[in-house]
Amino acid sequence: MKTLALFSILCFGSLALAEDFKTIDGKEYKNVTVRRVEPDGIVLSSKSGISKVYFTELPKDVQERFHYVEQTPNMEALRKKPDATEPMAISGIETLPPITVKLNDELLNALRMTDKLDTLYKRGCSSAELIAAALPVESVIMNLQKKLPKTDPRHDLLVNTFEAYQNAAAVMKANEQGKGNGERPIALIATAQLRKHLLTKILEGSMTPEEKTFYYGWRKALTNP
C-alpha cells in the first residue's frame, strides 16, 4: 500500500488536467480527468460521472505513460488468491482498493459500537451521557482511520459518521444550557446513522443497486460541490 500511495503522490501533479483517452476498440473518453491510478487501470472523472478503464483496454503508449507492467500468470493467480494469512475482504464497491478481512471486521465492530449512542439518544439521554458513551468509540475510530488512506471513501464515512455523533452531542449541550440556535440534534443523529448504514453495506459487500446509486451520487457531490 505504501508503494501505491507513493506512486499516486508522484503522479498527482500530472493528473490534474482534463484530457482525452481512446481505447484500443475505439471507445472515447472526452475531457476527462484521471482521478486515481490503480494497479490494473485508471479511474476517470467527467461531468457525466466516474468510470474505470483497464490498462488492457488502452494503447501501449498509455500503458507505458502510467508505468503499467502486465502481470504474469503467476502474479495474476496470486492477486486472485491472496496469502491465506492475510485474506482480503470483498467490498460493496468494486473500485475501492482491497483491505484485509481483519481490518474490515475491525471497521464493522467500530460501527457497531456506535449503536449504543443511537440507543441512548432514542431513550432521551443527556449530552453528558452521550459524550461519556462516545469516548471509548473515539479512541477506536482514531486508531482505525490511520489504517485507511485519507482519499479512501471508507475513511471519510468512518470519520464523518463519528463527527456527526459528536456534533449532535454539542448541539444537545448547547440546548441544555440555553445557548442553542434552534438546531435539532435528531438531524445530526440521522446523518450519522445514514453514513453508518452506507459504510456497513460497503464493508459487508451487500449493497443494493439503489444504495450504490446513492453512494456514487454522494461521491460526485463531494468532488463537484
Image: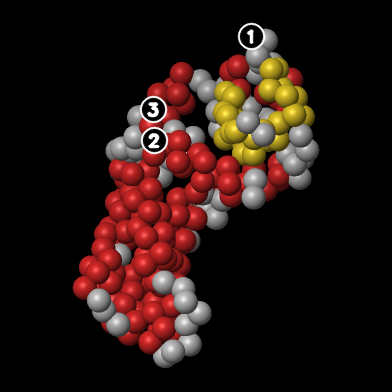
Foreground mark, 2 or 1, reads 2
Checking the image for residue 210, the label placed there is 2
Instruction: Give left or right: position of 125 versus 55.
Output: left
Question: Which badge, 2 or 3, is on the more N-terminal residue?
Answer: 3
Image coordinates of residue 212 in percent, x first then y, are: 42, 37
In the displayed structure, 109 sits above or below 12; it is below
Image coordinates of residue 185 in percent, x first then y, are: 39, 71
**Callout 3: helix, strand or loop?**
helix
**Callout 2: helix, strand or loop?**
helix
Image coordinates of residue 139 in percent, x first then y, are: 38, 72
Checking the image for residue 25, the label placed there is 1
Callout 3 amino acid: Lys
In the displayed structure, 153 sits above or below 167; it is above
Foreground mark, 3 or 1, reads 1
Q: Residue at x 45, y 50 (%)?
A: 154
Foreground mark, 2 or 3, reads 2
- Mark 3 sits on what residue? 80
Callout 1 amino acid: Asp
**Callout 1: helix, strand or loop?**
loop
